[in-house]
Amino acid sequence: MTNHRYYRRSAERHSIAKDREDARFASKLMEQLSIAAFVLDGSGRVLIWNRACERLTGVLAAEVIGTMDHWKALYEEERPCLADLVVRGRLDETKTLYEAWSNTEVNPHGISAERWCAMPRIGKQCFLAFDVGAIYDDMGRLVAVVETLRDLTSHKQTETELEHLAGSDALTSISNRRTFDAKLAEEWRRAKRNASQLSLMIIDVDFFKQYNDAYGHQAGDECLRMVAKTVDSQALRAGDLAARIGGEEFAVLLPQTSSQGALAVAERIRKAIEGAEAPHCGSSVSPNVTVSIGVMTATTDLGLEYFVKHADAALYEAKNGGRNRIVSYALDNARIEDRKSA
C-alpha cells in the first residue's frame, strides 16, 4: 500500500513537472514568435506579452504582465480587446466594436476582426487584424485566451487610395459617373424607405466647345477643374455628392433636400462660377464662364428613371431659355422656377 501511494505521488509530481515544463516551453515559443501576440488568463489578466507585441505597440511586457491594462496599448480610452470579449462571454458586442469580424468554422471559439487603433504609445493610428483563440482544460473551463495582432496599415491605406482613385474623376478629382450612379441608387432606396425628399441638379458649362476652340484643350481642362472645385465647395454637406458625369456635365445629389433648398444651392453654384471671372470670349451670355443648371426634386412615389429624366429636361430648358440660369421642377413636374442671372 505504501509503495502504491509512493508511486502515485511520484507520478503526480512527474505530471506537474511536465505540465510546468510544457508551460515554460509554450511561453518561450510565444516569445520567439515574429507575430505580435499576448495571452490572457481566465480572469482577463495578461500572462504573456511577447517581444513582437512590444515592438508593435511600444508597450513593454513588464508594464502589463499581471494586469488588465493591455487595452492601453491600442486605445486612448478603456474598451475591451477582442480577447476580453471571449473572457467575459460578450461576443455579441463584437459587431459594434469592430469594423469587420467572423467566427471561424474550424474552432467555434476562434474569432477574427480588424479595425483602426489609436496606438497611443507610438503616436500613430494603425489598422490591425486580430485573431483570437480560447484554450480550455479537460473540464471545459476557460484557461487562457490567445490574441495575435497583425499590422495591415500599409495594405489598408493602399486599398483606400485605390478605392478613391476608382471612384474619382481623373481630371477633376471629384467623384466620377460610377460613384454617382451607385450613390444615386443608394439614396433613392433610402428616400423610399424613409419617405423623404431627394433633389438632383445637373450642371452644364455654357458654350464649352467655343471655350475649347478659343483657348485650347489644356485651358478647357483647367476650366473644368475650376467648375468642379467650385461645385464641390459650394454644394456639399455631409451626405451630399458632387460628380463629373461626362464631358462638361456635372451632377449634385442632395438627400433630404426640398426644391427650395436645392434651388438655393444651385444659385450659389451659378453665382460662384460666374463670379470666378474666368474669361470666356466665346460666350454670348457673359464675358465669363457660366453654367446652366437643371434641378429636380421628388419623393420616391416617382420612378428613378423619371426622376433623372426630368432633371435632364430641366437642364435642357435652362440651356434653351438662354443659359446662365436655373430651371427647377417640383413633384408634379410643374415648372416652379426659371432663374436667370442678375
Image (tube, rainbow, N blue to C red):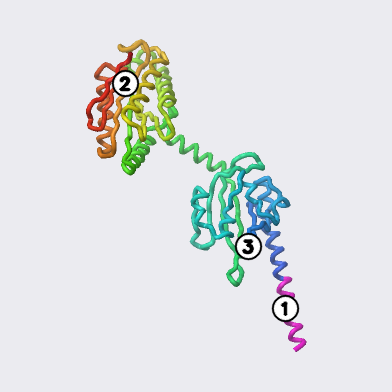
Question: Crowdedness of circle 2 by 10 Å Cα count: few (<14), some, many (20+)?
Answer: many
In the depicted structure, whether residue 288 falls above or below residue 5: above
The three-letter code of the residue at mark 2 reads: Ser
Which quarter of the picture shows residue 197? Answer: top left
Rendered location of residue 281, percent (x, y)? 35, 10
Residues marked 3 and 1 touching at CB (< 8 Å): no
Say which residue label 3 marks.
42
Mark toward the viewer: 3 or 2: 3
Image point 41% across, 17% down: which residue?
Answer: 219
Mark toward the viewer: 3 or 1: 3
Which callout, 3 or 2, points at the residue further toward the start of the chain? 3
| Residue 292, label in figure | 2
| Residue 25, label in figure | none
The three-letter code of the residue at mark 3 reads: Gly
Say which residue label 1 marks.
11
Horizontally, residue 331 falls left or right of residue 130, namely: left
Horizontally, residue 202 falls left or right of residue 221, namely: left
Q: Secondary structure at mark 2?
A: strand
Q: Secondary structure at mark 1?
A: helix
In the image, which residues are magenta? 1-17
The three-letter code of the residue at mark 1 reads: Ala
Q: Main secondary structure of the magenta part?
A: helix
Which quarter of the picture shows residue 182? Answer: top left
Image point 68% across, 53% down: which residue?
Answer: 50
Q: CA distance from mark 3 to mark 2?
A: 68 Å
In the depicted structure, whether residue 292 falls above or below residue 19: above
